[in-house]
């Protein structure tokens, strides 16, 4: 098998440019036909009868193409029958059984939620086509969703465009160039992208940064002027700790805070039901953090409903920040 694959690669490499294009086009056509055959078979399993014009409309091909697909299904051993006349149509032979329960209704409902979540940041919906192929007729999938996942943001249009561009860069193994905004300012980066991920409540692209000569994660909402280059790259081995994201966090620091009881709901929202200790003078919280700017910004959002108790150097630093804010609003 390996020798056959190597031989095919050698033959392909020695082809002219036009021949290569023809081979790739044929492969694409075969994939499209396979997807269509699966879709037709699924529709026939779900419905007792359908028609060639209906299938042609649904798959956006000619009636003649559908009839060729029906012949292909018959050659594959699926007993598809056609009948002429007003009550005619295309169906699977009565009595022929095939296991349609690949997924349960609950599993399909979870799949629906996930697919719609991906569609929320996609420029082209994939939901309907996939569900046509996957959903068996006896699985009643409610389109009035019990779970709705929306992965988009305020910048939905630009976010979708970035994701599409990065998907092309990953598939074609081309680098991506963009301006990146971070705490120290703005910098032009060129990255060998490996995958796009949604984690820590945001979208990121993970790849090899040619400037830093290391793997990095870049938040999509911080990168702008994204463009694909003509520079190719070969995939590098990714250390497991970097792929999982564990390396991204430095050693944690601890902070002790006393909150007013009126903000209990916000603490539960951020850190869970048992994140604080209730005292007579308020809600005490001992919190580990890795990002100083984030934790200070979070605490400032509580106004006078939060007091930093320690460590002393952290309390002093927070006090200086509060004093600077006070001075900002008392300029003459």
Image: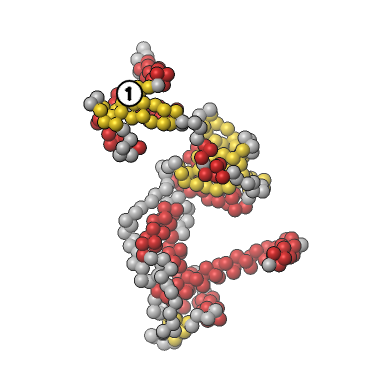
Q: Position of residue 7 (x, y in %)?
A: 73, 65
Residue 155, placed above or below residue 32: above
- Which residue is the extreme one toward the right? 14
Give residue 319's quadrant in the image: top left
Give residue 256's quadrant in the image: top left
Please give the count of numbered marks on the rendered protein: 1
Q: Which residue is drawn at the image coordinates 63% and 46% (left, top)?
A: 237
Q: Is residue 205 visible?
A: no
Identify the residue position indicated by label 1 in the image. Answer: 307
- Horizontally, is 319 left or right of 124 in the view? left
Q: Is residue 327 visible?
A: yes
Q: Position of residue 99 (x, y in %)?
A: 43, 74
- Which residue is the extreme one toward the left? 280
- Horizontally, is 194 left or right of 288 in the view? right
Q: Secondary structure at mark 1?
A: strand
Q: Which residue is drawn at the image coordinates 53% and 29% (left, top)?
A: 185
Front residue of 105/53: it is 105
Front residue of 202/29: it is 202
Q: Which residue is drawn at the image coordinates 62% and 66% (left, top)?
A: 27
Front residue of 309/58: it is 309
Q: Position of residue 292 (x, y in %)?
A: 45, 28
On the rendered image, what quadrant is the N terminus found in?
A: bottom right
On the rendered image, what quadrant is the C terminus found in?
A: top left
Residue 98, placed above or below residue 249: below
Q: Position of residue 166 (x, y in %)?
A: 55, 48
Q: How is the image coloured?
A: secondary structure
């Amino acid at each position: 098998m390996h020798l056959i694959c190597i031989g095919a690669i050698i033959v392909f490499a020695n082809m002219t440019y036009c021949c290569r294009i023809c081979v790739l086009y044929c492969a694409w056509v075969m994939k499209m036909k396979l997807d269509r055959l699966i879709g037709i078979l699924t529709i026939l399993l779900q419905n007792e009868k359908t028609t060639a014009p209906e299938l042609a409309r649904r798959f956006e091909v000619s009636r003649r193409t559908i009839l060729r697909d029906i012949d292909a299904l018959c050659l594959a051993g699926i007993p598809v029958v056609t009948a002429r006349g007003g009550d005619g149509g295309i169906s699977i032979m009565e009595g022929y059984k095939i296991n349609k329960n690949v997924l349960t209704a609950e599993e399909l409902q979870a799949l629906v939620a996930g697919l719609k979540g991906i569609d929320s940041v996609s420029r082209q919906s994939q939901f309907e086509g996939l569900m046509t192929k996957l959903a068996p007729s006896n699985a009643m999938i409610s389109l009035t969703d019990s779970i709705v996942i929306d992965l988009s943001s305020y910048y939905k249009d630009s976010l979708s465009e970035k994701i599409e561009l990065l998907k092309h860069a990953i598939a074609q193994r081309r680098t991506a160039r963009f301006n990146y905004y971070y705490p120290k300012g703005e910098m032009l980066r060129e990255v060998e992208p490996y995958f796009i991920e949604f984690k820590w409540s945001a979208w990121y692209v993970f790849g090899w940064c040619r400037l830093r000569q290391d793997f990095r994660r870049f938040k999509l909402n911080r990168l702008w002027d994204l463009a694909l280059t003509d520079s190719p790259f070969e995939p590098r081995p990714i250390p497991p700790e970097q792929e999982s994201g564990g390396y991204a966090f430095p050693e944690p620091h601890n902070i002790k805070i006393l909150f007013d009881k009126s903000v209990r709901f916000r603490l539960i929202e951020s850190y869970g039901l048992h994140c604080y200790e209730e005292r007579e003078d308020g809600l005490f919280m001992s919190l580990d953090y890795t990002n100083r700017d984030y934790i200070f910004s979070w605490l400032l959002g509580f106004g006078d409903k939060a007091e930093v108790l320690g460590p002393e150097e952290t309390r002093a630093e927070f006090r200086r920040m509060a004093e600077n804010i006070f001075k900002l609003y008392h300029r003459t």
